[in-house]
Amino acid sequence: MSIEKVNEKVALNISRNWYICRNEDVSLFANLSLGRILQIYIYEKFYPQANSVANTRNLKNMIKRLGYEWHLRFFHSKALSFKNQKKKQNCDVLLIYDVNNKPMIKNLNLVAQELLKRKISVAAVTIDANIKKQISENLSIYFLSEFYTISMEKNIYKKARSIRKQIKQYKDCLISNFKKSAKLPDKFIEQILKFFDKQVTQTVREIVSARAFLKELSPKIIVSSTDAHKISRMLFLLAQQEGIKTFVIQHGAPIWEYAYVPVTANKIFVWGEESKNWFLERGTPSEKIIVTGCPRYDTLSFVVDNLNMNKIEQFLKSCPNICLFTNPIDLSINFRIIKSFLSLPGHFFKNVFLKIHPSEDMNFYKGILKKFPCGKKVKIIHSVGIPEELRPGDIAIVGNSTVGIEAIAKGLILVNLELRGFPNPIPYQRYDVGIFADEDCLVEAVKSAFKRRCSISTYMQYLDKCKNFLENYLYSLDGKATCRIVDFLEKIFKSEVG
């Protein structure tokens, strides 16, 4: 069996259990499971499209492909910490910024500012300089590596060597674990075991540093936007050993199950009833789930509520703009989607936009557009969020992305592309707010989008469905999600300090 034929459930099961032999976790260090901490990266070996490397060939991405990304981040941030050494102080709440993702960082920044307003001290820990630049400046910000000293290295190397030796002793059993779940190629299994072997010493180094970090700062509460990624999961597991309360904020639409469950934190703040049901269906105990809404959507409003009917009619009578929003996914998939997009008859539209995801390389898309004569008419936008040029009644094409939520809130008519190999679609179709199509049927889908703007009454019926979707998916667009989260954290904090 090729890895392309391994379904999501099987890949999940392997990533969660491959390191268990004879009912024993053979990856343990200081009562922490390295297999569990590194689970997300093992899963991504089966589904590389879940976290594609950016469309560039720079040194950083080459190091990532070789499996030494975490070593580079750790020692680079350690070098930077020498320039700005500061006195380390205890904090009430610690925020973990370990993923360079703007929405995730924004969620934490909003929570941080609300905590500070309530006179609760906040510190932040991160892993590299690019993330640090995006953290609110009025926080005490630390690199995890600041708590590492060279004197730790001898013990780290000794412990890591012991773990690697144990993994080698159980190699036959580990290979059997992979093959019991799926008929995987021997070469692929060997690649995973080699990847894990490369990560052992660095992960032990991070655990030792994290333990020193928690001892020095002594937080009462820890909050992150993920508990699946390496550093957050590691710190949460260490914190729980020390009796520190841990909380995670749902960071995105739960498309990939491996990035959300099982929930490691004591509690998870979820967006709405849809998300709550999703987590319940996947075994998350109800007492772990708190419905709050999403902080970064506190500024999101249903734009059409503020427009008069005459203005809407004017938009509907004119030719619509159309915009394709890209995803940072497999390059060949993006190429096919753009090729299909360019086949649309341009004379039906006022403007044709290509909105590039902020993490992607604009030159890649410029290169694609040059291959097609009609590509000259496409305007490329490389900003964050919904472009200002788009108006209610315009058409947005998304690929199973949360940008569709913002598009709906702005009154755009949504076409949602099915991305092959991507599970758990956002329920746009179930609420009848998104026209579902694969890349080969895009022309027909856009024709259906035109029907939704053919009259004011038809368009208003569509908007009613959009409002219903937003209220179910995001709890309430009342601008108070951040406050609901901080209300809960404040209550826990006061109970901890007596």
Image (cartoon, rainbow, N blue to C red):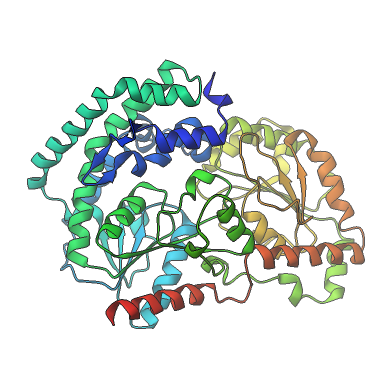
Q: How many marks?
A: 0
**Residue 56 seen from this side:** no
Residue 173 location, quadrant:
top left
Against 103, residue 482 (above or below) is below
In the image as oriented, which residue stretches furthest toward the front?
22
Along the line of sight, which residue is nearer the eye, 302 or 215?
Answer: 215
- Location of the N terminus by quadrant is top right
User: Which residue lies at the image location 45% right of the left edge and 78% below the top edge?
Assistant: 487
- Tell me where residue 243 sits by quadrant: bottom left
Q: Quadrant of residue 298?
A: bottom right
Q: Position of residue 58 (x, y in %)?
A: 39, 35
The front one of 20 and 381 is 20
Q: Name the image quarter holding the C terminus.
A: bottom left
Q: Is residue 203 left or right of residue 350?
A: left
Say whether residue 431 is left or right of residue 108.
Answer: right
Query: Can you give x and y, in whole percent of width and height, for residue 363 in the image?
Result: 54, 39
Above-or-below relation of 487 to 234: below
* Image spot of residue 451 (x, y percent): 89, 53
Q: Which residue: 54% across, 72% down?
A: 481
**In the image shown, does 482 or 384 lie closer to the viewer?**
482
List x then y, in percent, for residue 480. 55, 76
Residue depicted at 57% across the width and 31% down the height: 7
Q: Is residue 490 above or below residue 46?
A: below
In-front residue for pair 458/242: 242
Residue extending furthest toward the top: 186
Q: Is residue 488 visible?
A: yes
